[in-house]
Image (tube, grey):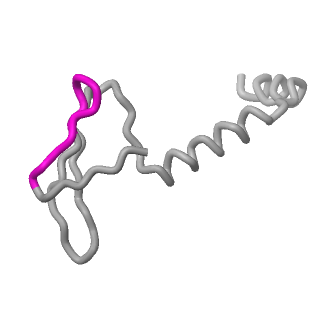
């Protein structure tokens, strides 16, 4: 892990097109801004872990095709 020290209004560059900037430091909290391409997903770590867990759970589901077909027939 790379560890960097930054002060307010200082930033780091990741690759060619991602900038992470320290916007404010107050009461032990750091506000950061991320300037990245719009097509790049950016998540808080805890949210990313939750999404990953939900995706794994969804992948383990085994759909009951008969029930799905019955449901679709009743919707027509």
Q: Which of 46 and 58 is in front in this view?
A: 46
Q: Nearer the viewer, residue 46 or 25?
A: 25
Residue situated furthest bottom in the rendering: 27
Residue situated furthest right in the rendering: 66
Instruction: State the count of labels.
Output: 0
Residue 64 in percent (x, y) is at: 87, 30
Q: Residue at 21%, 48% (x, y): give it.
A: 33
Residue situated furthest left in the rendering: 9
Residue 22 in percent (x, y) is at: 18, 53
Residue 54 in percent (x, y) is at: 65, 43
> Is 49 placed left or right of 4 in the picture?
right
Point out the image quarter for the C terminus: top right
Q: Residue at 80%, 35% (x, y): give it.
A: 61
Q: Quadrant of residue 41?
A: top left
Q: Residue at 50%, 54% (x, y): give it.
A: 46
Point out the image quarter for the N terminus: top left
Residue 11 lies in the magenta stretch? yes
Query: What segment carries the magenta color?
Result: 9-19
| Residue 10 in the image: above or below residue 26 | above
| Residue 31 in the image: above or below residue 72 | below
> Is 49 placed left or right of 53 in the picture?
left
Q: Residue at 47%, 50% (x, y): give it.
A: 45
């Amino acid at each position: 892990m790379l560890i960097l020290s930054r002060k307010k209004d200082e930033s780091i560059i990741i690759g060619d097109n991602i900038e992470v900037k320290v916007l404010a430091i107050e009461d032990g909290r750091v506000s950061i801004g991320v300037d990245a391409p719009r097509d790049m997903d950016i998540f808080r770590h805890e949210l990313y872990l939750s999404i990953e867990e939900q995706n794994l759970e969804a992948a383990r589901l085994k759909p009951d095709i008969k029930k799905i077909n019955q449901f679709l027939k009743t919707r027509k």
